[in-house]
Amino acid sequence: MGKRMGPILTGVMILIITINCSLALAVGATGGSYPVHTNVTTTYFWVGEGASADNNYISNSPSAWDELWQQHYGGVDDPNHRNGYYPAKFKPKENPFYFALPYNDFDGNGNRKINANKVYWWGSKKWGALESCCKNQWIKITKGSKIVYAQWEDVGPYGEDDAGLVFGTAPSKSMGSNNGRLDVSPAVRDYLGLDDMDKVSWQFVDAGSVPAGPWKNIITTSQIYWR
């Protein structure tokens, strides 16, 4: 019996480790382990926003993943003339509840970044050559007692490679703080009643955990479009 205890204990330990790892993966898959980013400086931007000092002279007619973002959205998401959560002149073809964070899983040459493996759900599937593991993912945004959900459709502000901040707790590379920055759409702004510059909390959520609401009336499913 004494000689067999080593293999038996080893087997038990492997079983325990396997169970614990499975539980950890299950928690991660449901978003339970995604950290909450608090007190995040938040501004708003919109599809079709022209280049100006307010956005570092970067036009938002294209996005980081879609060179024809404005066309695919249906027009300019005018923040000053609204029809509910839609722009006044048209019903958008893509989700008006969108946001930008300072990370892109592709570099400027269209190659997948090595640090894309830091994305929480990276190992959940095999990603296509022109399929972003970030685009269309969901976050939960909280301001006081109000909660809204939105999809990731652009990159920024202030950088495209803050993986440690977006997928962890590292300080912002560009802002030198632990909360970084978040850009949200006019629909998110209006739902939460945000000022031009405000503070919110946000957290990644899996698509299956997103509750019903105006953010699910139109869901963006398009992927990368580079001409």
Image (spheres, rainbow, N blue to C red):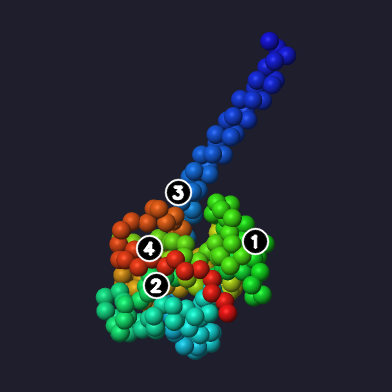
Q: Nearer the viewer, mark 2 or mark 4?
A: 2
State the SS at label 2.
loop
Q: Quadrant of residue 106?
A: bottom right
Residue identifier under label 4: 149
Determine the residue positioned at 51% across, 85% down: 59
Which residue is at the far top? Answer: 1
Ranked by sequence position, the earlier of labels 1 and 3 is 3
Q: Secondary structure at mark 4?
A: strand
The answer to whether residue 163 is seen in the rendering is no
Q: Earlier in the sequence, mark 2 or mark 3?
A: 3
Residue 117 occupies quadrant: bottom right
> Counting residues from the N terminus, which is met first, the one under dot 2 or under dot 1?
2
| Crowd rating for badge 2 (residues with CA inside 10 Å; few <14, some 14–19, many 20+) | some
Is 142 above or below relative to 69? above
Q: State the image coordinates of residue 7 (x, y, percent, origin top left).
A: 69, 21
Whether residue 132 is visible here, answered yes or no, is: yes
